[in-house]
Image: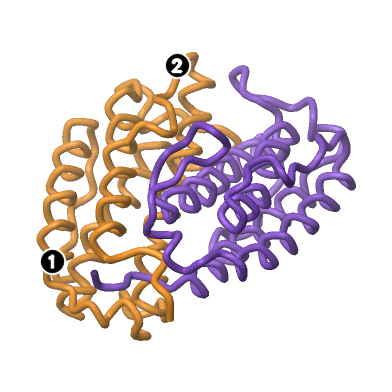
Chain colours: A orange, B purple
Amino acid sequence: MAMFISTDALLAHWQGHRRLTRRVIEMFPDDQLFTFSIGGMRTFGALANELLSMGGPMAHGLATLEWGGYAPPKATSKAEILQLWDEGTAKIDEFWARIPAERFQETLTSFGQYTGFGYWQVLYIVDNEIHHRGQGYVYLRALGLEPPPFWER
Amino acid sequence: MAMFISTDALLAHWQGHRRLTRRVIEMFPDDQLFTFSIGGMRTFGALANELLSMGGPMAHGLATLEWGGYAPPKATSKAEILQLWDEGTAKIDEFWARIPAERFQETLTSFGQYTGFGYWQVLYIVDNEIHHRGQGYVYLRALGLEPPPFWER
């Protein structure tokens, strides 16, 4: 099997996305974070809570094969989201270093229900973050605000 | 360097995303594809044209190191977008097989201006597709339509 990307580079790529997502959370108007919505969708605050429940806990699970050992509480303010975000960022670095390299090519079940290769588990989380952040961009535009450039990480 | 994901698996991952994006294009109302917008953003038709100009051409460029040798025309209807999409999907498979494995770890400049590792070039394209498709999800919801599940590929 030829390598597309290394584990180190993927972590750097993921953390780059997390820096951009953090900027989007940071610039989201406080008074709209848990109220503004389009087409009946979840608020960006709710989406951010979903992302918090996936990133750090996935890194923890891949390192320990225990699911649920690390779960951030549900945030109810922007300050709380940002604090949990930074905590999650540090947890990801910490646990990533403990994931056995071969685990990414093994099949495993995360959170008691999602079965796939280790790399698939991680990419699902990263892609889901990009997906919901893209939705946050539309919310910001609808609120008259210009989101940060997509390429800035 | 420990491998996170192989070149074969990344191609399959990318093509899975392309299948989902194709479904979103397909279900987008014809009469809204080049007109509907939120917050002054581009239409989903314009975003789809951007994606068309990046996917196939990136695979072509990585295989040949020639940028601009393959560029789809700008589509002006859903039928045309879908036709070019399928063409791009086939081109990606075709050119991917011709990319030297070591190229993904080399630094190169794409389209005369974007410099980074080969893997970075590809991930940028894939991530950009997820980002804009996520925006398409908001457009669909705002139009009263339920997008396909994110996990269906």
* Image quadrant occupied by the C terminus of chain B: bottom right
Kindly identify the amino acid type of the residue bearing the numbered disc 1. Ala
Residue at 35%, 65% (x, y): give it.
A122
Left-right relation of A114 to A89: right
Chain for numbered disc 1:
A
* Numbered tag placed on residue B28 in the rendering: none
Q: Position of residue B6 (x, y in %)?
A: 43, 73
Q: Nearer the viewer, residue B61 or A74?
A: B61
Could you tell me which secondary element the residue under label 2 belongs to? Answer: loop
Chain hosting mark 2: A
Which residue is located at x 18 percent, y 61 percent? A71
Image quarter hosting the N terminus of chain B: bottom left
Q: Which residue is mark 2?
A: A145
Question: Mark 1 or 2 closer to N-term?
Answer: 1
Q: Amino acid at mark 2?
A: Leu
Q: Residue at x 18, y 52 (%)?
A: A73
**Percent x, y for residue B114?**
47, 36
